Image (cartoon, rainbow, N blue to C red):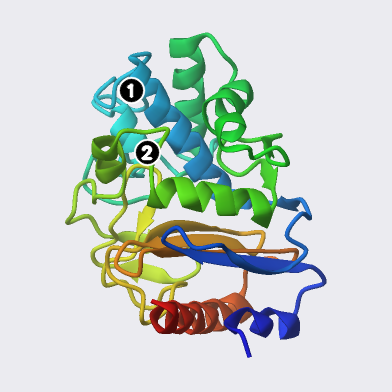
Amino acid sequence: MGALEAIDSWPATTVAAGWRQATDAPTSRGATTHRFPLASVTKPLVALSVLVAVEEGSLALDQPAGPPGSTVAHLLSHSSGLAPEAGENAVLSRLGTRRIYSNQGYEVLAQVLEGSTGIDVATYVREAILDPLGMTDTALEGSPAHGAVGTVADLLRLGGELLRPRLLAPDTMARATSVHLPRLDGVLPGFGRQAPNPWGLGLEIRGDKYPHWTGAGNSPHTYGHFGRAGTFFWVDPEADGFLVVLTDRPFGPWAGRAWPHLSDAVLAEMTSAA
């Protein structure tokens, strides 16, 4: 039985998943062309768009953005000290001292991107990332923190780009997938306090976090993101592969059990196929 058959028993009405290793053809199951809300899987799309703008010279990672002293890089890596949501106390900690997962930070990022390029964030994401990758069924339709919709078929294209970058220079991708401010502690939503809580530029990094939504077999260098809508993707450089899962059931305890189990099963298939 293939690893992805496990999603058939998940407590969701609609589920789709796909994985790919190296340049092999992807393996998928379920409604791969169904458009799901991506929730916080939106953030990597916006972050990659910001990195395209950096390479184009429209803005810089060390450009001031957010609280005093904060930069674009701080916002991308949730290290600016901004509160999780707008309307809360604006700044909860000193700059660069704590990893606070912040939707508000991505709202600020979108404003910076729009101000620097003169292009609204939804259009910039489409022109910088979605159109070049052929992600025709994905769009930013709301908040830059959690407002995109998309399909597994499209996110398989994104995973291929992350494994073998074409839109971004290898050095840029290496920086995005390396830990920014390595020693910061913080709370990983849904999984509690992590010490440390590594994060790259728009991408969460697995490190030695426990508990975690990836598998026990995922390497510490694994990076990706999950969303409250029951969505996730990870890329494991050591396995040279990635997994994408989208569902219509919100994140909850079921996901904390099902996602790591599926991840380990997919990693086992990758190992046997290598």
Quarter of the figure that contains the C terminus: bottom left
Residue at the farthest right position: 13
Give the percent coordinates (x, y) of residue 200: 31, 48
Q: Amino acid at mark 2?
A: Leu
Mark 1 Cα-neighbour bin, 10 Å: few <14, some 14–19, many ≥20? some
Compared to 117, does 184 lie above or below? below
Residue at the farthest top position: 118
Give the percent coordinates (x, y) of residue 195: 24, 67
Number of disc labels: 2
Question: Is residue 46 something that shows in the picture?
Answer: yes
Give the percent coordinates (x, y) of residue 125: 56, 29
Measure the C-alpha gap from mark 2 to mark 1: 15 Å
- In depth, the one of 172 and 105 nearer the eye is 172
Describe the element under mark 1 as helix, strand or loop.
helix
Q: Amino acid at mark 1?
A: Glu
- In depth, the one of 38 and 159 nearer the eye is 159
Residue pictured at 22% horizontal, 55% vertical:
184
Q: Is residue 29 left or right of residue 198?
A: right
Compared to 36, does 187 lie above or below? below
The residue mark sitting in front, 2 or 1, is: 1
- In depth, the one of 145 and 167 nearer the eye is 167
Residue pictured at 52% horizontal, 40% vertical:
45
Q: Residue 55's mark?
A: 1
Describe the element under mark 2 as helix, strand or loop.
helix
Mark 2 Cα-neighbour bin, 10 Å: few <14, some 14–19, many ≥20? many
Residue pictured at 51% horizontal, 84% vertical:
261
Q: Which residue is mark 2?
A: 76
Quarter of the figure that contains the N terminus: bottom right
